[in-house]
Amino acid sequence: MNGNTYDALVIGGGINGLSALYHLKRLGAARAGLVERFEIGHDRGSSHGAARVTRSAYVAPEYVRLMQWVHKEEWPRLEKDLRKKLVYSNPGIYTGPPCERYHSYVHAVAQEGVDVELLTADEARGRFPQFTFEGVESALLDKTGGFISSTEAIESLTALARENGVSFHENIVVHGIDPTGDPVRVETSGGTIETERLVVAAGAWAKELLPFLKPSLNIARQTVGYFTPEDDLDAYRPGRFPVWAYREQDENNLFYGMPEFGRAGVKVGRHLRVGVDDDPDNPPDAIDQEKIADVKRFIARFFTCKNWTLAGAEHCLYTNAPNEDFIIDLHPENPRIAFGAGFSGHGFKFGPLTGRLLAELAWKGETSIPDAKLARGLFSLKK
Ligand SMILES: Cc1cc2nc3c(=O)[nH]c(=O)nc-3n(C[C@H](O)[C@H](O)[C@H](O)COP(=O)(O)OP(=O)(O)OC[C@H]3O[C@@H](n4cnc5c(N)ncnc54)[C@H](O)[C@@H]3O)c2cc1C
């Protein structure tokens, strides 16, 4: 690998790195490469698994507008170029017991003009009899909701990049970046790579490569279960079953899920965000059964079907930033290096947009997406 020189190099083959690569090719990077410490599609980071929820219902106006843009512009362009359907519309239901956190969420989303409708608990039960809606007074129906076929997004972005002549360096670990070099020098387990422009999208390992990110990021390993109901499985398929979340006042008391899609079982997980900092290099040997039991207790309370079989489970990493705001910026020492980190538990749906932002920042120092320009302050390292 010694002696490789690129117009643009990407570190990290998750949704952000692959999307940045796609946009770097669109911007004209003739010699482009990507370095990935495992194989593309591996299950040690954050982008694996069959599907991800998408929605425009956000509290902060910047995210609402960016999601409206990504739904209207970025995912459709990607689907066209990849010749693949990736995004499926499906109603969303967001609920929780009466508490400040739930009320402020409902209020903020409604104020932003997102296409939502507030249902009473009885109306919600009538519409989605799969849930008991125990302990809640209302539920927000999000008509902008849906899910993304994440495995297919990763696979088809990789296939397109290969077709376009991108060099993939898999099972190669980047150990260091010399930002002062011209071109930039990247030290890897396979030798040195030189590049004119660099995008760093290293997920849970970002703070190892960019130590200035250390104070801003913490890693939380998530455990997700896939469950098969004893009763009518059709009631949990797309169209009839929503993408959903249930939030209480405590930040870690957020459960979520989606219809069965892309693999056996209905996905249910608990969004664990605060009070942990896991080591991405030290994955557990087995699925944490206590976490599965915890999810089962929630299902027993909030789902009408009481008998479920565990069809599968997986771990996945959140790289959390304060307030869950993404950190997307230029390297403080070199404006030809852009980095993205802290995509927390909600970054996949933004992938084609955050990838474009990373590519444009590295390639020309600024973004051409008007709402992303406005969000630069929100995503800034110095915020
Ligand atoms: C359980 C779970 C559920 C989620 N649900 C949703 C959802 O419903 N909707 C949504 O929008 N988002 C969701 N997310 C969040 C979303 O999946 C992540 O924000 C997103 O996948 C982050 O992608 P990434 O490319 O930044 O990181 P990653 O996918 O982790 O990619 C980073 C890559 O960099 C590689 N790498 C790191 N360091 C090096 C190095 N030194 N050398 C070479 N390669 C390196 C890693 O191996 C990895 O492949 C969820 C996340 C989890 C864990």
Image (cartoon, helix red, strand yellow):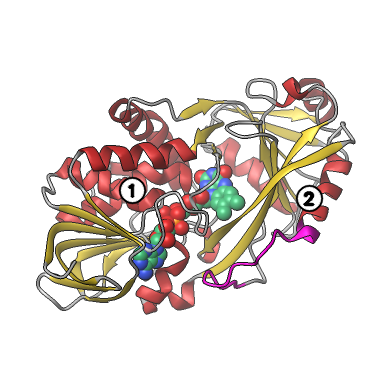
Query: Left of 314 or right of it: where is 49?
Result: left
Residue 273, x across and y down, in percent: 63, 62
Instruction: Specify whether residue 290 is painted magenta.
Output: yes
User: How many dots with numbers?
Assistant: 2
Q: Amino acid at mark 2?
A: Val
Residue nearer the viewer, 335 or 263: 263
Q: Quadrant of residue 236?
A: top right
Q: Quadrant of residue 340?
A: bottom left
Residue nearer the viewer, 104 or 227: 227
Query: Left of 285 or right of it: where is 304?
Result: right
Q: Amino acid at mark 1?
A: Leu
Q: Quadrant of residue 79?
A: top left
Find out if the beta carbon at label 1 lies less than 8 Å from the nearest ligand 1 atom. Answer: yes
Q: Which of the numbered marks, if any, corresponds to residue 295?
A: 2
What residue do we see at 60% from left, 31% from top? 261
Q: Is residue 186 visible?
A: yes
Residue at image mark 1: 18
Distance in Å between CA atoms under marks 1 and 2 = 32 Å
Secondary structure, magenta segment, majority class: loop
Local packing at callout 1 (Cα closer than 10 Å; few below 14, some 14-19, many 20+) is: many
Q: Which residues are magenta?
A: 277-291
Element class at badge 1: helix
